[in-house]
Image (cartoon, rainbow, N blue to C red):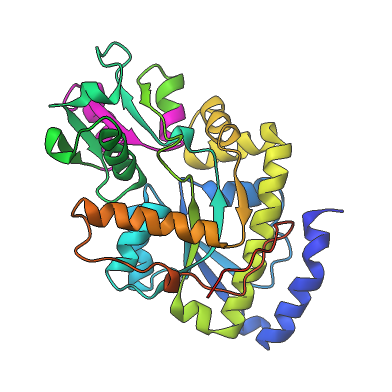
Amino acid sequence: MSIRSKLLTLAAALLLASNASASERLSLRIGDQKGNMRAQLEAADALSDLPYDIQWAEFPAAAPLAEALNAGAIDAGIIGDAPLLFVLASGAPVKAIAVDKSDPYGTALLVRPDAPLHSAADLKGKRIATGRGSIGHHLALKALAQVGLSEKDVEFRFLGPVDAKIALANGAVDAWSTWEPYTALAELSGQGRVLVNGRGLSSGNSFLAATDKALQDPARRAALQDYLNRLAEAQVWANQHLDSYSKTLAAIIGFPEDAARLQFERRQLRWQVIDDKTVAEQQDTADFYQAHGLMSQRLDVAPTFASGFTVPGAAKVAVQP
């Protein structure tokens, strides 16, 4: 049975719940990063017969997506654990509704292939490019702490992915702390080498986060549940049809097909409901940022998760109140 067939019943229910005529068709505004979600949905033909419209907004990184969420310019978007914390700490009316678990290898510190650097300890006194508050920033701080160094032992240059890539290539920085698909592209193009990968340092969690306004609207909340269902099913399809998915993703993000495939294949992504383990991991990340002076006060992350959303095929583990 196709994804479309599985979701026809839910789509019909959504139409009834919204009580909207064709002229009043709901439009869901979704923020994506480098075609991540859109490519999976399009490749799996999971956008057919939508009972609502999707307005896509693509962002090169989490920071501008977070700003769009905070401003209410989008209803929902995919965002890593660390940048989500900053938008929440600013008081933005946003909540995470589901988590995308992954192998965090590709969240990595990259150096030039010929660089005489062999471990995080070699970064002392060096210049590191990353996005402030990004998962790359978090990884760099964790990697430094693991070898007894701190942010005071290096010089951070806060740059977007495009500028950071250029800075590494021309020697303006010594390392670039980044994430997929940029890591895969750098490796396969011979422009970067993984110095430190994210395993054991990063949770590998990304979230589908939505604004409180969208969550409080019954029709829009129902549309978000339907979107999440389609997304989870499409991700399973993408993992089972890597060739087809990689071609679609490469076309959307403008990356070579081999880089598009590598970054997805090794992440082993899987959507899950929010559980206690995920909440605890997010709290650990928030506490780490506070300890390093990036947050002025402790953030209790528990209220920043929305309950009631389900994920097809995922184990239902209740979050303790």
Q: At which x and y percent is residue 219?
A: 61, 82
Q: At which x and y percent is residue 80?
A: 42, 52
Q: At which x and y percent is residue 154?
A: 15, 33
Task: Please state the total of marks drawn on the protein image.
Answer: 0
Q: Residue at x 30, y 61 (%)?
A: 86
| Residue 32 shows up from this direction | yes
Q: Residue at x 26, y 22 (%)?
A: 169
In the rendered image, the vertical position of residue 98 relative to residue 27, given as above or below = above
Quadrant housing residue 22: bottom right
In the rendered image, the vertical position of residue 187 relative to residue 272, given as above or below = above
Residue 205 colored in magenta in the image = no
Q: At which x and y percent is residue 320?
A: 55, 71
| Residue 57 shows up from this direction | no
Q: Which residue is drawn at 73% across and 38% down?
A: 240
In the rendered image, the vertical position of residue 271 relative to residue 300, given as above or below = above
Which of 46/272 is in front? 272
**Residue range highlighted in magenta:** 160-184
Which of 280/45 is in front? 280
In the rendered image, the vertical position of residue 4 relative to residue 212, given as above or below = above
Which of 82/300 is in front? 300
Which of 127/150 is in front? 150
Q: Which residue is drawn at 57% across and 74% down?
A: 307
